[in-house]
Amino acid sequence: MAWSLDNEFEAPGGTIRWTTLGNGEPLVLVHGTPYSSFLWRDLAPALARTRQVYAFDLLGFGQSEQREGQDLSLAAHARNFAQLLDHWELSHPSVVAHDIGGAVTLRSMLLEGASFRDLTLFDAVSGGEWERGLFQLILEHAEVFHQLPGYAHQELVASHLRHATNFGYRPAVLDTFLAPWRGESGQAAFYRQYSQLKQEHTAEYEHLISDITIPTRLIWGTEDRILPPHYARWLHDRIPHAELHWIEGAGHVLQEDAPAQLLAHLMSTFE
C-alpha cells in the first residue's frame, strides 16, 4: 500500500512532508490523530481526476519529522497549516478535514487569517467539551503513559485505532497507522502530540464559528464512538447554514468505514 509524500516544507518545528495530485481547482485534505495522510490513499487519486489535491502529514505525524521539543499544539498546527497554504500559493482552496484536522482548519481560518473557498468537516474536533476519554487521561497522567512497556503501549494504540472504526481495518492498514508510534522514539512521539492537544485552543475561536459564511458541509458517522453524533449537532447549531449529512453504520474513520459514500459527498456540489 504505497503512499509517498515526495515534497518537503520546513516549518518552525521541523519538516512537513506533502504531495499533490491532479489538476484543477485546489482541494486540501487535512488528517487527524493518531492517523496520517495515509487515510487519503484511495480518496486522493479519485478526487484528483477533477481537482488538484494536496495532502500532507501534520508535524510529528506519519512521514513528517518527529523529535523532542516540537510544539504540536492545535495552535502550532494551525500556524503551520496557514504557512503551508502560503507556500503552495493557495489563496482560496477547498478544504476537507477530519478529527483534529477540523480544529486545525477552523483555527487557521478564524484566527490565522487563512481563506477557504468552501469547507467540509467530518467526524471532526471543532469545539465544545471534547477533552475526554484517552485525551483526558494522557493530559492528566502523561508520565505514566510514557513509562508503559513497549508491548503495552503498542496494544493501547492498536486498541484506540480499532475503536475508531465500526467495521475494522485490513491488517496492513492497521500496521501502517501503527508504524510511526512503534519503538522508544515512536512511543515518545505518540504521547508528545497527545499531551499537547488541549480544549483551550478550540475555546479561543468558538465565539467566531457563527461568523463562518463560506459554504460548509458536515458529514458524520452515526456510530462514531470517538466524537459521537451530538458533536455534529453542536457544530451545526453554530453554523446553521451548513449541510449536515449522516452516514449510517459508519464509525469515526469514514475513509475506512464508508469510502464510497464519503467520496460521493466530496465529489458533489454544495447544496
Image: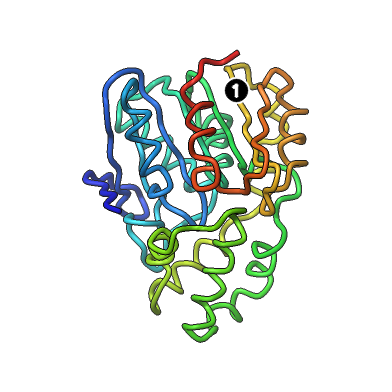
Residue name at image x 38 percent, y 66 percent = 179
Residue 249, x across and y down, in percent = 66, 44
Question: Which amino acid type is marked by label 1?
Answer: Thr
Vertical relation: 92 (above or below) 41: above
How is this picture coloured? rainbow
Residue name at image x 55 percent, y 46 percent = 257
Residue furthest to the top: 271
Residue 21 in the figure: left or right of residue 152:
left
Residue 192, x across and y down, in percent = 50, 66
Residue name at image x 57 percent, y 73 percent = 156
Q: Quadrant of the C terminus?
A: top right
Please name whichever residue, 93 or 260, is drawn nearer the observer in this view of the structure.
Answer: 260
Q: Say which element carries label 1.
A: strand
Give neighbour class at mark 1: few <14, some 14-19, many 20+ (Cα, 10 Å).
Answer: many
Residue name at image x 58 percent, y 77 percent = 145
Residue furthest to the left: 6
Vertical relation: 71 (above or below) 268: below
Please name whichever residue, 229 or 260, is drawn nearer the observer in this view of the structure.
Answer: 260
Number of numbered discs present? 1
The image quadrant that residue 182 belongs to is bottom left
Please name whichever residue, 251 or 116, is drawn nearer the observer in this view of the structure.
Answer: 251
Residue 79, x across and y down, in percent = 46, 41
> What residue does disc 1 label?
216
Residue 90 in the figure: left or right of residue 215:
left
Residue 21, x across and y down, in percent = 27, 32
